[in-house]
Amino acid sequence: MRAFNCDHCLPERTGGRTVATNLAWACPACNRYKGDTAFGADRQTGKRAALFNPRRDVWEAHFRWSHDFRQIVGRTPTGRATVERLKFNRAKAIYLRGLLIEAGLHPGSKLDR
C-alpha cells in the first residue's frame, strides 16, 4: 500500500504556498492526474472549471454517490471537472469502493438514501 501524498490545493506553479491552509492529503493516483493544475474541463458546459478544493469547497455541494455507491458523480462544473481530471471513477477505485461496501466501511453507503 502506498501512502497518501501531501498535495497543494492551489499548485505552487500558480502561486499556491506551502502552508497548512493550502495542503491536503491526496491518493497518489488522484494527485498524479491532477498534476500542477487547478482547473479541468466540464464536458457538460464545454468550459473550464476550477477543481474541487477541499480547504474551501463542500463535498456534498459538488458531488454525490451513484445509486450503488461505487462511482462519484459531479453535480456542478467544479464537481464534473474534478471527477474527470482526477479520474475518480477509474476501475481500481470502483473495485476498492465495492470492497469497502462489502466490509461496511464505505462512508457513502452509510448515508441516508
Image (cartoon, grey):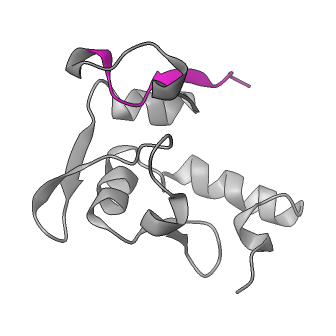
Q: Is residue 92 above or below residue 110?
A: above
Is 23 positioned to the left or the right of 112 in the image?
left
Seen at 42% across and 43% down, the residue is: 53
Magenta segment: does it hold 2? yes
Seen at 32% across and 46% down, the residue is: 51
Counting from the top left corner in percent of width and height, residue 108 is at 70, 67
Q: Is residue 45 above or below residue 5?
A: below
Tell me the quadrant of the picture where the C terminus can be found: bottom right
Q: What stretch is highlighted in magenta?
A: 1-12
Tell me the quadrant of the picture where the N terminus can be found: top right
Counting from the top left corner in percent of width and height, residue 65 is at 57, 71
Seen at 21% across and 21% down, the residue is: 14
Q: In which quarter of the image is residue 36?
A: top left
Seen at 60% across and 58% down, the residue is: 94
Counting from the top left corner in percent of width and height, residue 79 is at 37, 60
Tell which residue pokes out farthest to the right in this image: 103
